Image (tube, helix red, strand yellow):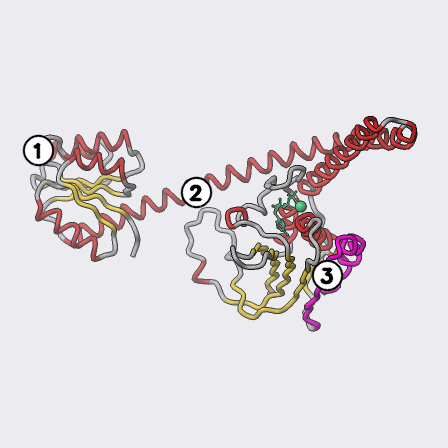
Amino acid sequence: MSNARILIVDDETPTRELCSDILDEEGYETHKVAGAREALHELTLNPYHIVLSDIQMPEMDGVALLKEIRKTHPDVEVILMTAYAGLPSAIEAVRHEAYDYLPKPLTRDGLLNTIRRCYEKIELRRKLKESQNKLIEQEKLAAVGAVSAWLSHRMRNSLSVILMCAHYLQQKAVPAASGDLKEVIDAILAKVKNLEHITSDLITYSRRYDIQKTPQNMNVILDETLQSLNSQFQLQKLTVVKKYDPKLPEIPADPHVMHEAFENVFINIFQAVGKQENQTVTIKSEVVRDYLAKPPADPFGVLNLAKDQKPVAAVSLSISNTGSVISEENRGKIFTPFFTTKEDGSGLGLAIVKKIVEDHGGEIFAESSEEGEPNTTTIRIVFPLS
Ligand SMILES: Nc1ncnc2c1ncn2[C@@H]1O[C@H](COP(=O)(O)OP(=O)(O)O)[C@@H](O)[C@H]1O
Ligand SMILES: [Mg+2]
């Protein structure tokens, strides 16, 4: 059933064996020790969800073990067992927050029920913590978004003034100036242009879209984007291979916003390919029949939505290029805002693309060749057809 890890602590071998036999058979991972000190040592070596311990043990008893675990491993649940079901030890156990108290002799059902409930509690707590962390992360991003929107709007005006001044200097001063001065002005121009690019990405990322969806053929939007970037494709001598499905169904989309998304993907390709020659960009559109769409958002992560997933038809677009790879480690990060491997990158291009794709009900993935294969990178965008 589950992979809960349970540490069994008892000085009597038969009880240890009985517990581990019952629990192993149910698919739990167990480990046995004969005393409390050994248990504390084992807890420093390996992770456990539950400690199942006898109370009466020589040297250090189960209640002392419980007290110690509460201090050192607050997330580990402790279940105590005893043959002398006396009130005082039960009260002690409860007072120090044992999860439960099992009388000996143990019954199979009694043990399994208690362990099951205990593990459910642990899982629920973990999921709650996960969703809490997710919410904190989202709030952080929203705060960053608000600050960057404010900052970038203010920066943009100053930057255009600096840019104008640098252009002016370049035109007026450079023809007569020394090599040094020319270099300085060129450096100012390059850096200001880069800052302009970053601020414009920040503004795009933090703006509120007003999406106007109408039925659109993605082949057409891809073609329009290719057309607008034609000079850059020619400059880098990139071969474009189109594998369009001529019968691609229309989907509701905002053509301007979608154009912007595709543009960001192509700009990354231009930058990744750089000066390499004989590289190819392949653009493919197709209808896939058995796409498993992402289940709807489940903020508390406690519902099992996966089993309700049904394969659906979807429009799939993939944009591949040769001449670059994304390491496996980075593949999971490239859609995160501010992640960049470029010295002057904003790290927002693909975050913007992801946001646009998700606002259209789609999903985006990155795939890349493995070591030993020819270098290729693919960005795949899928829009389920409802
Ligand atoms: N076609 C590609 N080939 C290789 N790496 C890519 C490609 N597209 C994106 N990347 C990686 O994804 C990162 C994030 O891209 P992006 O969000 O557009 O930010 P930026 O372009 O500012 O770095 C890039 O820094 C790069 O490492
Ligand atoms: Mg980019």
Q: Earlier in the sequence, mark 2 or mark 1?
A: 1
Q: Quadrant of the C terminus?
A: bottom right
Question: Please, which residue is most extreme toward the bottom here?
Answer: 247
Is 189 left, or right, of 319 in this rendering? Answer: right
The residue pinned by badge 1 equals: 58
Measure the alpha-carbon separation of dots 1 and 3. 78 Å
State which region is magenta: 218-246
Disc 2 residue: CB within 8 Å of ligand 1: no
Q: Earlier in the sequence, mark 1 or mark 3?
A: 1
Disc 1 residue: CB within 8 Å of ligand 1: no
* SS at badge 2: helix
The residue pinned by badge 2 equals: 130
Disc 1 marks a residue whose amino acid type is Pro
Q: Quadrant of the N terminus?
A: bottom left
Disc 3 marks a residue whose amino acid type is Thr
Give the percent coordinates (x, y) of residue 61.
Answer: 13, 33
Residue drawn at point x = 54 percent, y = 49 percent: 327
Give the percent coordinates (x, y) of residue 244.
Answer: 69, 68
Residue drawn at point x = 53 percent, y = 69 percent: 290
Is 358 left, or right, of 156 in this rendering? Answer: left
Q: Nearer the viewer, residue 156 or 193?
A: 193
Q: Nearer the viewer, residue 103 or 41?
A: 41
Disc 2 marks a residue whose amino acid type is Glu
The residue pinned by badge 3 equals: 239
Contact (Cβ within 8 Å) of mark 2 with mark 1:
no
Compared with 367, 248 (above or below) is below
Residue 345 highlighted magenta (yes or no) = no
Give the percent coordinates (x, y) of residue 134.
Answer: 49, 41
* SS at badge 1: loop
Give the percent coordinates (x, y) of residue 207.
Answer: 69, 41
* SS at badge 3: strand
Q: Nearer the viewer, residue 329 or 228?
A: 329
